[in-house]
Amino acid sequence: MEALARFVIRAEPDMAIQVFKWGCSIAIIDEMRDFWLSKLYSHLIEYSLLAIPDNRKSEIFEDALLFPLATEVNIDNDFGQRWPNPVVELPPVRNDSLKISSRLDEIINNISPNNEDSVHALIKLFPLIESGYLKPSELEKLRKVVWGSKENYSILPTLGIFNHALLHLPSNDKKSLALAIKKYSFESSDLYEIQTLIPIRNLVLNEEYKELPTKKQTSKIFNTLTTWRFTPKSTDIPNFFSGNTEERLAKEIAFTLNEAITPYLGKSKLNEANLNKLIGFYQETETFEVLSSFIYFSKKFDMAFDTLMKDIREGFYKEDIRKVVSSANALLNWCKFDFNDALKPLISKLIYSINLSRTNGLTTLIYTANKLYSLEYLSNENISTLFEVVPIIFDGTAYENVNPTSHLAINVTSVRSECIKLARELLKNNSNSELKRITEEAKIDPLPEVRFA
């Protein structure tokens, strides 16, 4: 089964559709729920779905919708057992199929307040809600299942999703719900929890239901997050129990500071004391991802400006992929915030680092170059370099040229897909035979990530 899964990801759409449909048809077999077999079965469903282009996925929409939920086959994913949950993001036009209506009714019935297993059904429903696929009667039933007959936003339901995702479910008063989630998130006493930080960030970034913390809340959250430090290492606790969790928390703290807190501190709070708190967090935790937060102090304090210039410039050439990625992200964010002549040498450094074709962080570097180009921050010299280097990188990452044991082998598909995305962007305003060649070759690439880039 694993061999078929690895084959089908390279298959033509017709074959991928055939394998996906067959894979869905055997879900009723009890052996598919075996602890060891369920992971391989998940790969078969996931990879065959991935190999189907978006314009053909309407052909397997019904199969994906009818596929049984983990709760319907009594599988608990919390204990490491996997069960696929195929979803078609862009459903076809709704028809009057009784089978579809009945299945949607079943899926909604698998949701209940204060039941985290509801997430499996909600994953199926979110794209259908977003696309307007559900009928008003189905939306109303879902609303009552989630909130009851009388909505009370003072107590948020536990459905296995982050609180901000509740805004995408039907409710009678989205604004009041957003305010309730805002209060719950921005005034939380559990700021060192990932499930608190992600909703804070998403509330701020959400275009439709955007909510910002007050100045007082912003200052308090900034103070709390910048005082976080790793727990002192203990020989009694294996690193795989604590280290990975804390490393992820550190990154989430950094992302929350960058995107939801530091930009909204206000002029009076962009002071030396707060800069020192940020420096302390940055240096003592070595959480390089927080580098973007220095941008907001850089106009006022040379220390912030110098830190950005030095660490971005040096970061492009580091072996640590986190430093490469953090440097690229910080440069892009800085350009968006305050593009100026001082940033032009840093942009040239980024383009030069791509030209070196170093494998560490190459995907992010190419992605960032694409964004900088689309925002018109690249010089003519920068663009000319990309014309030359992008086809070279694409050809150099041909699968037969990559050592399967190398670091590049892990990211070769993402590097090639980013090359194609950048090539297409460059071709919008320019003519180049080599860029055109690789975009044509990508159409028959063995892997769907590159074919559909």
Image (spheres, helix red, strand yellow):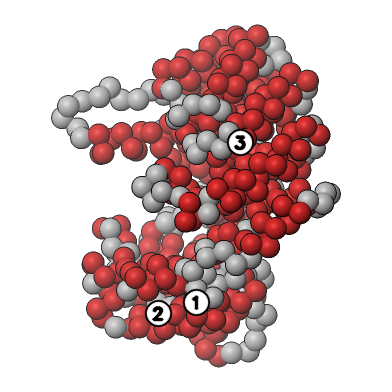
The amino acid at mark 2 is Gly
What number is the disc on residue 16?
A: 1
First in sequence: mark 1 vs mark 3: 1
First in sequence: mark 2 vs mark 3: 2
The amino acid at mark 3 is Ile
The amino acid at mark 1 is Ala
Q: Residues within 10 Å of mark 2 (few under 14, many from 20)?
A: some
Quarter-of-image position of residue 377 = top right
Q: Nearer the viewer, mark 1 or mark 2?
A: 1
For mark 2, give the secondary structure: helix
Q: Quadrant of the N terminus?
A: bottom left
Residue 33 appears in the figure: yes
Residue, disc 3: 354
What number is the disc on residue 23?
A: 2
Residue 216 appears in the figure: no
Horizontal and vertical percent for residue 207?
69, 48
Q: Tell me if residue 235 comes above or below residue 410 in the rendering.
A: above
Would residue 445 appear left or right of 246 to someone viewing this image?
A: right
